[in-house]
Image (cartoon, helix red, strand yellow):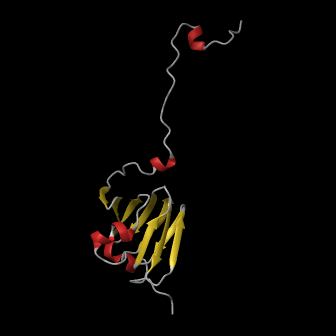
Amino acid sequence: MKKRAGGNKAKAKGRKAPAARTSRVSKPAEEGLRAIKGARHHEMAGVKIDSVAAANGQVKRVVYPPGFRWSTHMKPLIGTELCMHGHVGFLTSGKVQGQYADGCTFEFAAPQVMVVDPGHDAWVVGREPAVLIQFDAAAETAQRFGLPAEHRHAS
């Protein structure tokens, strides 16, 4: 049997070669921002929030855009001096820094678990959005996760 040099088997037998597949390979960041089945979506001050009811709370994907700062973008809408919501979750991408009223600071860089007490200002660092998967119980989040009502040092 003779070997055919440099030819496609399909071509050699008179058939059309299958078309090359040109599927777009998504980046991990894009993959993590696809629509979530069954989620409620809303935006506030440029922050995109998708939430799904889970047990007696909810799981949220919160996407903070580059340049976001709570005191600049949310404070005018919420009306409190600092963010009074506790945050418990997993930062999947980006970097977040913040400060409490007493001057204590925090910094999280993905991938990292985040726990932030109520009574903080926070901002996104760099050009990448900060994406937080947050476990939330609305006004009861701090209490349910054992956080103080407001950041304070242990006595």
Q: Position of residue 31 (x, y in %)?
A: 46, 47
Q: Residue at x 53, y 70 (%)?
A: 107
137 or 103, which lies in front?
103
**Depth check: 98 or 87 in front?**
98
Q: Quadrant of residue 51?
A: bottom left
| Residue 69 point in image, percent of width and height | 40, 66
Farthest bottom residue?
155
Give 110 or 140, whichever is nearer the viewer: 110
Q: Is residue 127 above or below residue 10?
A: below
> Which one is in front, 139 or 80?
80
Q: Is residue 120 above or below residue 128?
A: below
Q: Quadrant of residue 77?
A: bottom left
> What residue is drawn where x is 44% and y is 62%?
132
The residue under the point 49% across, 21% down is 19
Q: Position of residue 98 (x, y in %)?
A: 47, 72
Q: How many marks?
A: 0
Q: Residue at x 71, y 6 (%)?
A: 2
The image shows residue 106 at horizontal and vertical percentages of 51, 74
> Relative to 13, does residue 27 appear above or below in the rendering?
below
Q: Quadrant of the N terminus?
A: top right
Placement of 131 over or under 99, stated as above or below: above
